[in-house]
């Protein structure tokens, strides 16, 4: 292929707009978020700190591999701030060259996991104000997530109500690692509000939690923690199905973010098998568990699994159904996926369009 | 029976019978012992303790054997005769490995745990293994007390009917941790495999969000427990230190493993500086060291689709036959599972098992 034809092909390729369902905007300085807090909570954070179930204050439970807590080494903006803290550089490195038509923000604040839930609620509100001020007001392509503290559902619902009129918020962000499994009735007011307002709930892999990250206690290594990220998503999905969330709120839509997806077919087979075996225990679960997945659940693709034999990815896509998957980069994290290179097998044009764009534009009504 | 005879003997569409395969069943559950069973193997002090402290039948909350899903209709595991009648004879088994998964794994007192393990092993040997030469067993060792676990392995090293040691999928700490290495050292030295069996000692909630409401959810969550143990054993370098140790995942569901292998291998490429002693792709290590029993099998009902899922493992020698008797997974345990490809039957029923268990000797 000569330079000119390659150039043409690339330009044709780039006309397909991409929806990136997982971008992590960052604070320029550690105290940037605090400026959005009321004085009372700013002083609280200064005098008593933001305390969570993680063992260290101010550092990650498992040190990451690359500088900046696991960032792409080339994502540091020229202005000296941390990766993804500078909109201009995010535009230059991500949004423009990858032709991102819409970029969905997944802010990772620890608000939901704070021991002090009033502080957590204030942090969630601050995080939402910050999204508007620093990102949504400044680039029309970006979309926000209404961050809430799920342990205090009344406050969470109030925060949802306060934000729904701003249509740039396209989903509700709820961490999957709650104190109790996500399907428990105590969390239902959030799902009811989400269904009522037609907003999906997105659950993003979460490094903070009060419970051990495996059923055998805490892992030793980051690589183990990272592999176990999908555990939280699997648990949330299993719980929501078997507690009857999708029966009670048939319009409720769930998006599982940053857990990959190859674990889903075995989980569906397992849930279906055990449901057949133990239906008497859960008579309120009327349909086969995998049916709820196929009607109410979506997943983002990153970090995409790379089978040892590339074509095995087709089996996985077939078992899940390509209508369930939405592309994501996870910018600016080290395990970033690129829309052209993430899939190690060629995809049919229609499938590619659905995963890179169409599924997300329909789900979020973009 | 040779292949032709088998083909002639089977009418169209009939399931492949297990009898004739010379199968070795890698997961059979005898009833777990009660106090009266164990008293003969206790000294005076512990007999007194068992009586005065009401220590009797111990059943795991996470693996409640008295419940409906654990009992096939008509199941009987009360004695070796019952197993002969219901399982060994009708399936024509060459051998069967008995797994006691009981409250022993959840006992807090390390000394009590050690005594329970030893007494249960003695009971298994006297009441089961001595009664039928086809019976083998997993050795119970107190992970609560690694020093005593090593002693128990040494005590039984000469009894090759104990082919592996048993751990539950969710225990006190991840199985790769160095605290357990003395146990693995002894196990490897004497050729025992490590069986990781479904169940939790409830030292930790089974999920990252605590305890689920329903038993069915907990069964689903067991797959995560297995996955975490595989990652822990590889990441901590257990196979670097103990290259002859084999790990058998019992009742894991099987099909979750390829996705985990892909995930861990990809993560290893990015994060290997954290675990520099792991010098090979985790998928390669996993294929070499891990084996899995076939019941239950989480797969599509169509065996052609299931075949694809098995192909993702990249190694059919990882699969070992099991009936999981008396647990109720529906279907006919005397027949090859309809959802699994029949071409695997002969290797899975026997060859793979013999290649896994160094200590296993078939009665000629």
Image (cartoon, coloured by chain):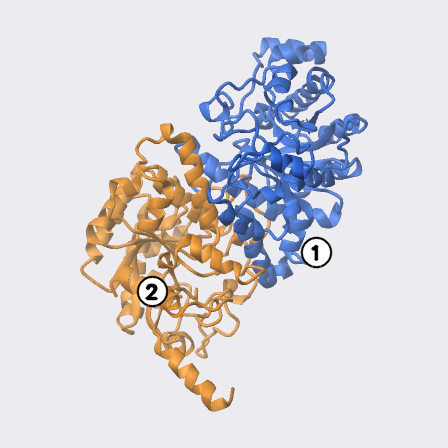
Chain colours: A orange, B blue
| Residue B165, image x, y percentages | 69, 32
Query: Is disc 2 surrounded by few (<14), some (14 to 19) or many (20+) residues within 10 Å?
Result: many
Residue that carries the numbered disc 1 in the rendered image:
B277
Residue B304 versus residue B361: which sits nearer the camera? B304
- Asked if residue B207 lies left or right of residue A144, the reply is right
Q: Give the chain letter at badge 1.
A: B
* Residue found at the far left of this picture: A165
Q: Give the chain letter at badge 2.
A: A
Question: Which quadrant would the N terminus of chain B be assigned to in this image?
Answer: top right
The secondary structure type at the circle numbered 2 is strand
Say if A84 sits above or below A209 in the image. below
Residue that carries the numbered disc 2 in the rendered image:
A104
Residue A29 versus residue B147: which sits nearer the camera? B147
Say if B167 sits above or below A195 in the image. above
CA gap between label 2 and label 1 equals 39 Å
| Residue B227, image x, y percentages | 55, 45
């Amino acid at each position: 292929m000569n330079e000119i034809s390659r150039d043409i092909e690339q330009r044709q390729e780039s006309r397909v707009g991409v929806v990136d369902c997982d971008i992590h905007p960052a604070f320029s300085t550690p105290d940037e978020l605090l400026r959005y807090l009321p004085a009372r909570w700013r002083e609280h954070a200064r005098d008593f700190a933001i305390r969570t179930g993680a063992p260290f204050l101010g550092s990650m439970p498992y040190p990451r591999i690359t500088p900046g807590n696991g960032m792409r080494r080339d994502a540091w903006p020229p202005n000296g701030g941390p990766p993804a803290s500078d909109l201009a550089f995010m535009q230059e490195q991500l949004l423009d060259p990858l032709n991102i038509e819409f970029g969905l923000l997944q802010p990772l604040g620890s608000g939901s996991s704070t021991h002090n839930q009033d502080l957590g609620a204030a942090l969630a509100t601050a995080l939402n104000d910050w999204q508007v001020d620093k990102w949504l007001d400044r680039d029309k392509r970006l979309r926000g997530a209404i961050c809430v503290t799920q342990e205090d559902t009344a406050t969470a619902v109030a925060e949802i109500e306060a934000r729904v009129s701003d249509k740039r918020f396209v989903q509700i962000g709820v961490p999957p690692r709650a104190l109790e499994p996500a399907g428990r009735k105590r969390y239902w007011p959030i799902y009811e509000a989400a269904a009522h307002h037609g907003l999906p709930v997105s659950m993003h892999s979460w490094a903070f939690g009060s419970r051990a990250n495996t059923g055998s206690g805490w892992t030793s290594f980051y690589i183990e923690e990272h592999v176990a990220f999908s555990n939280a998503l699997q648990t949330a999905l299993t719980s929501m199905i078997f507690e009857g969330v999708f029966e009670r709120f048939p319009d409720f839509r769930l998006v599982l973010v940053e857990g990959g997806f190859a674990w889903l077919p075995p989980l569906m087979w397992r849930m279906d098998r055990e449901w057949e075996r133990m239906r008497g225990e859960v008579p309120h679960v009327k349909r086969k568990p995998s049916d709820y997945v196929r009607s109410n659940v979506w997943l983002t693709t990153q970090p995409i699994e790379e089978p040892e034999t590339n074509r095995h990815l087709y089996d996985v896509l077939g078992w899940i159904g390509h209508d369930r998957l939405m592309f994501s980069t996870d910018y600016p994290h080290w395990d970033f996926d690129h829309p052209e290179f993430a899939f190690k097998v060629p995809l049919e044009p229609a499938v590619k369009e659905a995963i890179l764009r169409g599924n997300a534009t329909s789900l979020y009504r973009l | 029976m040779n292949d032709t005879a088998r083909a002639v003997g089977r009418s169209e569409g009939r399931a492949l019978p297990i009898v004739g395969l010379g199968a070795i069943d890698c997961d059979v559950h005898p009833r777990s012992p009660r106090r009266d069973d164990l008293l003969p193997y206790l000294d005076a002090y512990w007999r007194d303790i068992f009586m005065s402290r009401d220590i009797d039948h111990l059943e795991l909350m996470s693996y409640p054997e008295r419940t409906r899903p654990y009992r096939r209709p008509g199941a009987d595991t009360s004695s070796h005769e019952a197993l002969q009648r219901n399982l060994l004879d009708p399936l024509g088994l060459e051998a069967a490995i008995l797994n006691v998964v009981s409250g022993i794994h959840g006992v807090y007192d390390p000394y009590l745990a050690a005594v329970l393990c030893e007494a249960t092993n003695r009971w298994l040997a006297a009441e089961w293994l001595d009664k039928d030469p086809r019976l083998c067993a997993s050795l119970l060792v107190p992970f609560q007390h690694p020093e005593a676990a090593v002693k128990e392995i040494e005590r039984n090293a000469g009894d090759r009917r104990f082919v592996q040691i048993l751990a539950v999928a969710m225990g006190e700490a991840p199985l790769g941790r160095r605290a357990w290495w003395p146990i693995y050292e002894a196990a490897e030295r004497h050729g025992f495999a490590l069986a990781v069996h479904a169940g939790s000692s409830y030292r930790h909630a089974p999920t990252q969000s605590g305890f689920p409401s329903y038993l069915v959810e907990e069964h689903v969550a067991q797959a995560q427990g297995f996955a975490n143990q595989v990652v822990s054993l590889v990441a901590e370098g257990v196979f670097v230190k103990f290259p002859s140790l084999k790990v058998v995942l019992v009742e894991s569901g099987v099909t979750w493993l390829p996705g985990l292998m892909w995930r861990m291998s990809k993560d290893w490429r990015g994060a290997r500086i954290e675990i520099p002693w792991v010098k090979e792709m985790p998928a390669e290590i996993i294929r070499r060291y891990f084996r899995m029993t076939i019941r239950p099998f989480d797969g599509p009902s169509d065996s052609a689709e299931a075949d694809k899922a098995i192909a993702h493992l990249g190694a059919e020698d990882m699969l070992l036959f099991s009936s999981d008797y008396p647990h109720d997974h529906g279907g006919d345990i005397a027949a090859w599972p309809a959802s699994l490809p029949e071409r695997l039957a002969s290797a899975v029923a026997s060859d793979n098992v013999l290649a896994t268990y160094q200590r296993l000797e078939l009665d000629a």
